[in-house]
Image (spheres, grey):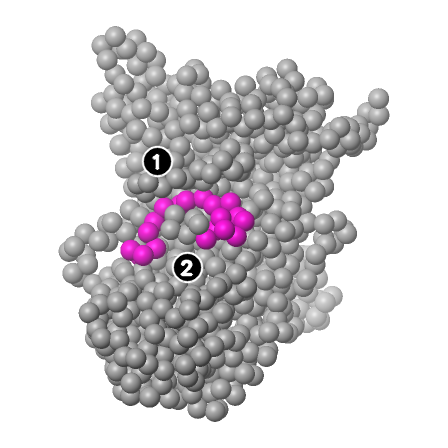
Amino acid sequence: MAATQPTADALSDNRAIPARLQSWKKSLDSVATLSGYGSLDLNLAEQNLARLFARVRSSDYPPSAGVPREKPPAPDLEEDGAAPVHLNIVIHVIGSRGDIQPFIVIGKTLKAYGHRVRLATHLAFRDMVKENGLEFFNIGGNPQELMMFMVKNAGLLPEFKTLRSGAIQHHRRDMGDIIRGCWRSCVETGDGTQGREAPGDSATDGADHLTAPFVADAIVANPPSLAHIHCAEKLGIPLTIMFTMPWSPTQAFPHPLARIRRYSTKPTVANFISYAVVDLLIWQGLGDIINRFRRKTLGLDILDTPQALTLVHRLHVPHSYLWSPALLPKPRDWSSNIDVCGFTFLSSASHYTPPEDLLAFLRAGSPPVYVGFGSIVVEDPQRLSLIVFEAIQKTGQRAIISKGWGGLGVSEVDVPENILLLDSCPHDWLFRHVSCVVHHGGAGTTATGLKLGRPTVIVPFFGDQPFWGSIVARHGVGPSPIPYRELTVDRLADAILMALEPSSRKKAHEISEVIKQESGTNAAISSFHHHLRDARIRCALCPFRAAVWWLKDSEVPLSAFAMAVLAEAGLIKVRHLELYRSKEYDTARDPGTPLIALVQVVLGSLAKFVTDVGDVSLEILAVISGQRRRKYSGRRSPDIEAEAIARAISASSGDPSAALAHTASLVTAACDPGKKRSDRRVGMREEKRSPSGITQWVPRAAARTEHLAQEVLDIIVIPPMEISLTLSKGFHNAPLVFHDNSVRDIPRATGIRSGLKAAGKELIFGVYDGVSGLVTLPRRGLKDSGAKGFIHGVGNGVGGFLSKPVAGLFGIAAYPLTGLHKHLKRSLAEEKQDHIKCARIAQGVSEYHRSSLEEREDVIRRWRVLTGNTH
């Protein structure tokens, strides 16, 4: 029996399955298989899993209170009445043209609010991004190759012939490049095309943003870009996930990439678990690449599988989903950090001039059927063309067929007179003139067809396309989707005729009227600004600017501009500044019980230790052999970055003052490979060895050895830290299982000193709360709930007495080791911060010289008021 899913018929597929995983245990009989068109089949039959996942989902994904909000609030202003702070926003998007277009709309609207917006995506979409007035950044990857690969390997696991061909390694390398490209888009000057242009391609156009320093203050991303949470964790900035299909665990429906067949399993449990299984498959395929990126490029701790699964959702990252709540309402178990906003549409109709042959064809008869598969690239376009042509002939309809990336109809196939082959044409113009639409089920194309009231036939190829096909069928706007591998002339002809029936047209008109009343773009922007309130992102002196520096002495967050003004006035010293983090993400384990803690230690710590030892062993071999890495991971070579910073500073109107110039030179030195400091850093540039240069190589090798000694020490620290910290947290959180509300927050260790303080705090409070709870908890229970509460309090008191002191004992080792580990990580990752500081300095210099005298005086006046120095 199929689990709850919009139309079971729409998801039925009995074709051969390329991959299969089955498990038989007591009370558990489950099968995971890969379907023929990119979704995961899960056959679940068990009795006890429901109780387990009921506990998990209640703790990790608290539902919203009351009736769920289908629309976010529309706060153009913050709660304090101030307009949204102006940010540097980078948008990470990978996918096809239809995946990019909604984010162009989002980007244009964010820009209208005063934000600087950079859209980071594939080079193929640069012109489309720039034509819409947004900054572009190339993250790599070829979307056309990706579409071809997905059609050939529609399952989440590839076919054996693909494994043998070496295509998997090629696409894994591409994903690694994309992930690193996403990081570069957060911190790099320019548009990311240096050295990556196609022959004859000109990447630069002299625009100011190509020389203006850029460091992201916030990230917007779609889930497949993968780097989003890791970049946000590194920079300490807000992240918002936006997407056109569900990616958050829910009991209401399964993951769009999964199809579930259950036996004794409750449908809500089966739906919920499907998200973790899809996450697991993605992590198994790309987890090593992501961990290498975290360790080598970002200087972050690597993640094990328990940590990585549903990481974004455990951290309650805001999500704004871009579909109509009339089609798919917000599930009741989605918490307040998730909004369903509505469709976004990139309008091109007003700027489009149709060719004469298209106008003549439209005038020549009744409205035609539209057939097009967009960015889909098929292996045999001639076969698909013949099926479409014959189906159209069988229906007796006229048709406009879009060639698309797959070259539909361009092979040696005779085109009937009642069919017009068309190149690129805006859907929002064309769909107004057709009777119904036949397409692949991409979210953007589906949304446009529904908004314009056109009955829809969906032929899904992979991914979420079957999901949207099922949504269309459920609302009666068209027939059940026809998977591409099952497409025949008769099935397509019958589906078109069904879509042309009056009932389908009526339903399409009704849905159209509802969607036209929505404003998905405005709702998404309001959702974004609404969730920014959780981040302390404002400058203390310039409320409209983002804080990027932290003044340690007074704990005052400052914008780049405010820092430049105060440095120019001699009111602050550079050594008192550090990079500000407006949002923290704790990706460490937080087990709910000692048993879970033990399982996580066994599963995760050993794998982490082996990975760390392997990485450092390679570093040691590199030092012994005298070789150096050829590039500094995660960004351009330092000489290019230093040159960009220098250009930005010199481009400012006028010369900076001596104080500000000195400030810039101090930090820019870190990016200059000619400076002594960068020579001490491991892996910052290629070194040419020669007999005459041996005297220079020896001290550098010694510096690299010192760097590696720190890495070895960190590796030694990690296993006992992981074990003791996880067990301490497990015992600390154990009373929460029984609703003991006296459990304190877990202390934080950010360095050696704070680690020692946290250890003492955990031990003292653990012993005190454990002993005193034997008296206070029963007394509180008796006062609140009588005899029943007294018994419950006795149980909580005994449980706390057994667990809280143990948490303190493990904490004696856990928190000092954690502090030492974080101190070492900061030291090892210091070089990765230098170019960010360079860019922030240059940003401040540039903004200083673009500002008015009144703006600068206002900053100084506010500073004097804030510090109490009015003279």
Please state which amino acid type lies under the numbered disc 1: Gly
User: Looking at the figure, which quarter contains the C terminus?
Assistant: top right
Give the quadrant of residue 683: top left
Is label 1 in a helix, a strand or a loop?
loop
User: Looking at the figure, which quarter contains the N terminus?
Assistant: bottom left
The structure residue drawn at horizontal position 75% and vertical position 49%, both measured from the top left corner, is 82
| N-term mark: 2 or 1 | 2
Residue 582 percent coordinates (x, y): 60, 42
Q: Are marks 2 and 1 in contact (CB under 8 Å)?
A: no
Query: Front-most of 389 and 300?
Result: 389
Q: Residues within 10 Å of mark 2 (few under 14, many from 20)?
A: some
The residue sitting at the bottom extreme is 502
Relative to 575, residue 420 above or below: below
Relative side of 560 to 373, left or right: right
Which residues, given as a range, are shown in magenta? Answer: 128-146
The structure residue drawn at horizontal position 24% and vertical position 27%, both measured from the top left corner, is 621
Relative side of 330 to 686, left or right: right
Residue 195, label in figure: 1
The structure residue drawn at horizontal position 36% and vertical position 82%, both measured from the top left corner, is 398
Residue 753 percent coordinates (x, y): 56, 30
Identify residue for label 2. 97
